């Protein structure tokens, strides 16, 4: 079961059980809704941005352990960062999930996001891990419509 | 195909004492002899697609290796052989479903296409603004969306019959919805893919006809698991899916009452569906060719014929009895696991176990089971309205076939316990 522990690392299980920054923001500067038609999971991302810096970010919705933990860890990771930094982090995170499993991992840049390195062994679950990030990206582009993983 | 079908009376899948021998049947399915993630494959996703016996693979291979030619066209020997095999499959499906004549079987790509065919031909010809189409809450998206599209095109109204908390159709409500006299067609699952509910089809047919409507049954989840007799049911249309009944993908069949099919306009235009073509006027071919434009899926159809032979060689009542035993066993075993909640507990049920494990998301359950070689479906099962009815987004679903065993259900139970262990109480 080593594989399973790679996927469901303690950090992921913890953020699934006790998600951080869960909820809504009454008057968010930016909002988008993400939808994964494969599993019916939905996530809402709310952001307040001041001077190009993400001051507050919250997520709401229901999903699997991977998508819930990913949203939770993402909100922690991007809070206080500039929009540019958040986008760059998404790119690094995306590479982590989609590049071959022997590609080197920049653990320092990724921080807690490195906990998702096990997901790349489970191609069917990559979309679970990226749903919140795609939705964040859409909110940053100020797209109001629902974003689909398909 | 020159090989004769196996005699359907041979009980070659029975043990000496007459009991069903699933282990012996498993030998007919090459795919089942493999390990997945280091464990023997436990395939419990049969409602999504069934596995294929050697007889089906051989029939298709033989067609391409020995008989491949276009059908209904050539005078040459291969074309005659291919046409005989194709029409032979039609006769097999006719007998399998109890249709009166082979012309009542139209080959289509899928059960989905069968529904679309009826909606687009019978539906567009017969529906007027204010007419009603009646479906049920437990329909697969393929038996919802074509009717929504038809209603948008014709001004007809879609009505939905409700179910109770066990996932059983509320027959009184169904009857009430028919009493307005506006219902022109009822479209309903014979067996629900998400819940396993076996609908009281015969009674639904009676009520539909009494209300002046015709009725189409979606038999995609019924035909692989029980004996179906369209004449005994009395239904007007019946749809089946080849790949869910041990046949290949890309082939399905629509049964339609001859007089209805005959009165319907064609579905698609093209070759094979015409008698004569000039630029001024085209005369359409007879039923069923009128609905089979273009070169059909000949290999798939022959594969479906072989699948029907295979199922009949075991016997649909034998299959139904064994699957019922597996369902009873699986229901008991799953109910013994603390935190497991079954979704779909109809009294009359096919071997589908839709369930939730505490607050663990079904996708996580699915991944943990996959790590143990166990294949189940997780998600909304293309039936979002029935998920909404139960206030859930998704379930984990183990759907059984006659080649499954009680040991495999034990493996499923052990896998679920493992998921509970990983995620904690």
Image (cartoon, coloured by chain):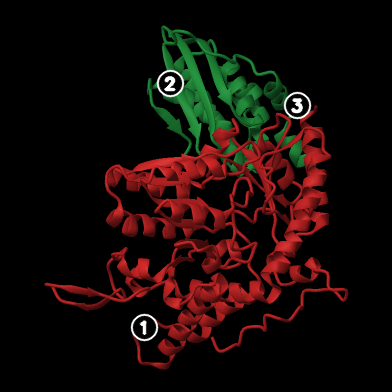
Q: What residue appears at the point 78 percent right and 66 percent down from the top-left corner?
A: B22
Q: Most extreme residue toward the left, as rendered?
A: B280
Circle 1 sits on which residue?
Answer: B72
Is residue B173 found left or right of A67 in the rendered image?
left
Q: What is the CA distance from the residue labelled 1 to the residue labelled 2?
A: 57 Å
Image colour for chain A is: green
Mark 1 vs 3: CB contact within 8 A: no
B293 or B261, which is in the foreground? Answer: B261
Q: In which quarter of the image is residue B268?
A: bottom left
Above or below, B223 against B66 in this view is above
Circle 3 sits on which residue?
Answer: A10
SS category of the residue bearing label 1: loop
B331 or B405, which is in the foreground? Answer: B331
Above or below, B279 against A112 in this view is below
Mark 1 vs 2: CB contact within 8 A: no
Above or below, A28 against B178 in this view is above
Mark 3 vs 2: CB contact within 8 A: no
| The N terminus of chain A: image quadrant | top right
Residue B356 image offset from top left, x and y in percent: 70, 36
Residue B425 image offset from top left, x and y in percent: 80, 27
B233 or A80, which is in the foreground? Answer: B233
Q: What is the CA distance from the residue labelled 1 to the residue labelled 3?
A: 64 Å
SS category of the residue bearing label 2: helix
Residue B302 image offset from top left, x and y in percent: 52, 76
Q: What residue appears at the point 78 percent right and 51 percent down from the top-left corner?
A: B328
Q: What is the CA distance from the residue labelled 3 to the residue labelled 2?
A: 29 Å
Are there few (<14), some (14-19), or many (20+) residues within 10 Å of tag 2? Answer: many
Circle 2 sits on which residue?
Answer: A139
Looking at the image, can residue B390 be seen? yes
Image colour for chain B is: red
């Amino acid at each position: 079961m080593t594989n399973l522990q790679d996927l469901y690392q303690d950090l992921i299980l913890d953020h699934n059980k006790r998600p951080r920054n869960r909820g809504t923001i009454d008057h968010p500067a930016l909002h988008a809704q993400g939808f994964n038609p494969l599993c019916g999971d939905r996530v809402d991302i709310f952001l307040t941005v001041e001077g190009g810096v993400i001051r507050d970010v919250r997520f709401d919705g229901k999903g699997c352990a991977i998508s819930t933990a990913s949203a939770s860890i993402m909100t922690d990771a991007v809070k206080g960062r500039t929009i540019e930094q958040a986008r760059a982090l998404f790119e690094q995170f995306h590479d982590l999930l989609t590049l071959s499993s022997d590609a080197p991992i920049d653990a320092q840049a990724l921080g807690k996001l490195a906990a998702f390195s096990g997901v790349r062994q489970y191609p069917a679950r990559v979309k679970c891990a990226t749903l919140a990030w795609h939705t964040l990206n859409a909110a940053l582009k100020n797209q109001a419509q629902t974003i689909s993983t398909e | 195909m020159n090989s004769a079908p196996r005699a359907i009376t041979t009980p070659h899948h029975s043990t000496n004492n007459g009991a069903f021998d699933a282990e012996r049947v498993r030998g007919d399915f090459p795919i089942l002899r493999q390990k997945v993630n280091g464990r023997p494959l436990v395939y419990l996703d049969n409602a999504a697609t069934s596995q294929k016996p050697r007889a089906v693979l051989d029939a298709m291979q033989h067609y391409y290796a020995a008989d491949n030619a276009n059908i209904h066209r050539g005078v040459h020997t291969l074309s005659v052989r291919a046409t005989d095999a194709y029409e032979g499959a039609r006769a097999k499906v006719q007998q399998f479903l109890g249709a009166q004549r082979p012309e009542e079987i139209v080959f289509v790509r899928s059960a989905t296409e069968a529904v679309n065919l009826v909606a687009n031909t019978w539906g567009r010809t017969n529906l007027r603004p204010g007419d009603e189409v009646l479906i049920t809450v437990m329909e697969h998206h393929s038996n919802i969306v074509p009717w929504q599209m038809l209603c948008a095109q014709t001004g007809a109204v879609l009505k939905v019959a409700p179910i109770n908390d066990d996932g059983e159709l509320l027959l009184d409500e169904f009857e009430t919805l028919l009493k307005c006299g506006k219902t022109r067609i009822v479209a309903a699952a014979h067996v629900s893919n998400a819940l396993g509910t076996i609908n009281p089809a015969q009674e639904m047919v009676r009520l539909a006809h009494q209300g002046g409507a015709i009725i189409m049954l979606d038999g995609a989840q019924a035909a692989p698991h029980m004996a179906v007799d369209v004449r005994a049911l009395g239904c007007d249309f019946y749809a089946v899916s080849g790949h869910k009944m041990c046949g290949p993908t890309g082939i399905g069949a629509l049964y339609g009452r001859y007089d209805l099919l005959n009165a319907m306009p064609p579905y698609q235009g093209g070759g094979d569906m015409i008698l004569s073509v000039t630029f001024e006027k085209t005369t359409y071919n007879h039923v069923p060719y009128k609905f089979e434009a273009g070169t059909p899926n000949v290999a798939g159809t022959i594969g479906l014929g072989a699948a029907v032979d295979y199922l009949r060689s075991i016997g649909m009542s034998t299959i139904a009895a064994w699957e019922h035993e597996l369902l009873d066993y699986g229901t008991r075993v799953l109910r013994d696991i603390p935190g497991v909640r079954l979704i779909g507990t109809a009294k009359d049920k096919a071997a589908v176990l839709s369930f939730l494990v505490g607050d663990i998301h079904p996708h996580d359950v699915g991944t943990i089971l996959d790590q143990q070689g166990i294949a189940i479906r997780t998600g909304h099962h293309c039936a979002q309205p029935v998920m909404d009815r139960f206030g859930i987004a998704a379930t984990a679903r183990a759907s059984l076939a006659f080649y499954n065993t009680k040991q495999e259900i034990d493996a499923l139970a052990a896998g679920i316990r493992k998921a509970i262990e990983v995620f904690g109480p």
